[in-house]
């Protein structure tokens, strides 16, 4: 029986990018394997859920959980791994704050199901057969997990010890986190306070951005496909909506370095909880107009404010999910200004 | 003296026969709060649905305050500052003007009627104007009904 610390990795509602990111630490994965006994990792090793169920509570030393929680199965696994793990880490943007899956909170379960199983152009389903949680067949009963109306982050369904943001977390940050954990476990060092955000910076993305910033005065917004941005100037200065000012540092300014605006995947900046409202604050300060009509014209350039400002943090938006009746078309805001 | 707590002001989603709207008004210290004070001194009455929070400048209004007010049970939010050109800090009210325009688009995206957020300019001498604005907003919110937040 191995005496090595036990490591589990799991994916819930995610794209699998976080799993790839773990492998992006390259040959250091061998160091991880040398130090840890990998006891559960559906994407890479052949242990089953029943193996986890058979473990004693707290038997797993470290669990990196990626993916948001949107089905009853996701929730079951989140709670199971919480019980079996000493340290549960929300790994990646989905587990931390919902990420792309949580953009589904701007629509409804019904709309999502209709599109996925009936209405999308590549689907042929004239009888509109929809997945059922329970189906009786001649060979037995088939069961599927329940699909939720609302996508949650991991900390909304269970107790989380640490958070590693990013979509996906960058390899150097993953290694830094694992190295720290190995150091703590090997040398019996104290753990960081619960709730700490690991593998990220303590400033904003702008701090890591190599571009030159000037006094910002924006007379209009453009979308990234409409312009070829100046390679050296701040993207926001050029009227491209860049989430840098409202996003935590840690990625090393990857996107902005290659001319793509920050989308906000490292989550809200330190000391702020709501990325969207912080971005509104930042943007409103730099719009160069005092005239209400001109302001509105400039703001027309921002397509889909909710999806842009909460692209990664929708599950933690202060206003919660978009009202179901609004998302299904009977919004109270329809008659609005 | 009102105590600010983390508890919701009212149970979200509960509509009762004797529903009374809750409107949070953020008033700048230099013009609007003084204006509301003048209304009080002049014994002008305004709708009790409106509760006032004093901020140093309308430019202090972090959009987070507004969404948090809605989250905690407010049915409407008023932000009031000095008239354009009169800001005690030169341009705080212009900043809030742009924020409110963008914030109205955001809350509309969440399914909240943008009319539930209103920006007004009230000077220190406009006590009656303040009372009118407060009453006007209260009747607007009464016609819109309670705001239902989904968790």
Image (cartoon, helix red, strand yellow):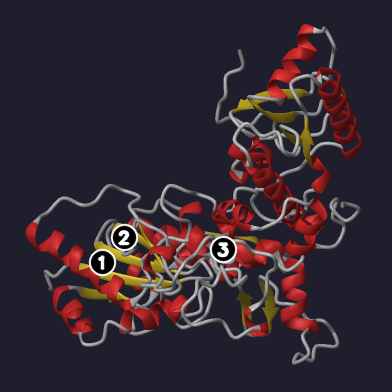
Q: Is residue A309 left or right of residue B18?
A: left
Callout 3: chain: A
- Residue under label 2: A198
Frontmost residue, A154 versus B72:
B72
Q: Is residue B77 left or right of residue B138?
A: left
Q: Quadrant of residue A130?
A: bottom right
Of labels 2 and 1, earlier in sequence is 1
A114 over A205 or under it: above or below: below
- Residue at 77% from the left image edge and 24% from the top image edge: B50
Q: Is residue A316 left or right of residue B127?
A: left
Q: CA distance from mark 3 to mark 2?
A: 28 Å
Neighbourhood count class around disc 1 (C-alpha, 10 Å): few under 14, some 14–19, many 20 upward: some
B112 over B48 or under it: above or below: below
Frontmost residue, B65 versus A233:
A233
> Is there a contact, CB below 8 Å, between mark 3 and mark 1?
no
Query: Mark 3 or mark 1: which is in front?
Result: 1
Q: CA distance from mark 2 to mark 1?
A: 7 Å
- Residue under label 3: A72
Residue A278 in picture, x, y percent from top left: 56, 52
Q: Is residue B72 left or right of residue A50?
A: right
Q: Which mark is residue A177?
A: 1
- Residue at 55% from the left image edge and 54% from the top image edge: A316
> Is there a contact, CB below 8 Å, between mark 3 and mark 2?
no
Residue B79 in picture, x, y percent from top left: 72, 35
> Is there a contact, CB below 8 Å, between mark 2 and mark 1?
yes
Question: Can residue A54 be seen by looking at this rendering?
Answer: no
Residue A84 in picture, x, y percent from top left: 32, 59
Q: CA distance from mark 3 to mark 1?
A: 30 Å
Callout 2: chain: A
Callout 1: chain: A
């Amino acid at each position: 029986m191995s005496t090595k610390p036990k490591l589990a990795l799991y994916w819930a509602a995610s794209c699998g990018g976080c799993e790839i990111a773990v492998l992006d630490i390259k040959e250091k994965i061998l160091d991880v394997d040398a130090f840890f006994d990998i006891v559960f990792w559906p994407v890479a090793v052949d242990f089953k859920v029943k193996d986890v169920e058979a473990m004693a509570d707290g038997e797993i030393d470290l669990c990196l959980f990626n993916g948001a929680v949107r089905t009853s199965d996701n929730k079951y696994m989140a709670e199971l791994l919480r019980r079996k793990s000493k340290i549960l880490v929300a790994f990646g943007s989905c587990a931390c704050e919902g990420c792309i899956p949580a953009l589904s909170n701007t629509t409804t379960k019904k709309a999502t199901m209709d599109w996925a199983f009936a209405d999308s152009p590549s689907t042929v389903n004239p009888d509109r057969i929809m997945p059922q949680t329970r189906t009786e067949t001649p060979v037995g009963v088939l069961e599927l997990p329940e699909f939720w109306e609302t996508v949650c982050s991991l900390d909304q369904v269970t107790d989380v010890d640490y958070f590693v943001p990013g979509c996906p977390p960058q390899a150097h940050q993953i290694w830094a986190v694992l190295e720290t954990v190995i150091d703590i476990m090997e040398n019996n060092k104290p753990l960081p306070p619960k709730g700490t955000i690991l593998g990220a910076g303590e400033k904003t993305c702008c701090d890591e951005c190599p571009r030159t910033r000037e006094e910002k005065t924006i007379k209009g917004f453009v979308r990234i496909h409409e312009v070829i941005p100046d390679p050296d100037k701040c993207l926001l200065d050029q009227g491209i909506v860049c989430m840098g000012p409202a996003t935590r540092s840690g990625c090393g300014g990857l996107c902005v370095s290659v001319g793509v605006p920050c989308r906000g995947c490292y989550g809200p900046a330190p000391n702020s909880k709501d990325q969207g409202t912080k971005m509104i604050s930042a943007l409103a300060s730099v719009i160069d107009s005092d005239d209400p009509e001109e302001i509105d014209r400039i703001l027309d350039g921002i397509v889909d404010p909710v999806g842009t400002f909460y692209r990664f943090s929708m599950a933690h938006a202060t206003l919660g999910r978009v009202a179901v009746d609004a998302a299904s078309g009977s919004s109270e805001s329809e008659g609005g200004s | 003296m009102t105590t600010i707590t983390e508890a919701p002001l009212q149970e979200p989603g509960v509509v009762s026969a004797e529903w009374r709207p809750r409107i949070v008004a953020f008033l700048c210290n230099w013009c609007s709060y003084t204006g509301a004070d003048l209304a009080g001194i002049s014994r002008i009455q305004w709708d009790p649905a409106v509760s006032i929070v004093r901020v140093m400048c309308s430019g202090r209004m972090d959009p987070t305050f507004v969404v948090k007010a809605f989250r905690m049970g407010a049915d409407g939010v008023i932000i009031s500052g000095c008239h354009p050109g009169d800001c005690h800090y030169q341009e705080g009210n212009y900043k809030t003007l742009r924020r409110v325009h963008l914030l109205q688009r955001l809350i509309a995206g969440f399914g909240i009627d943008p009319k539930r957020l209103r920006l007004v300019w009230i000077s220190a001498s406009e006590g009656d104007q303040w009372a009118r604005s407060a009453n006007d907003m209260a009747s607007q919110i009464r016609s819109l009904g309670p705001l239902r937040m989904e968790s």
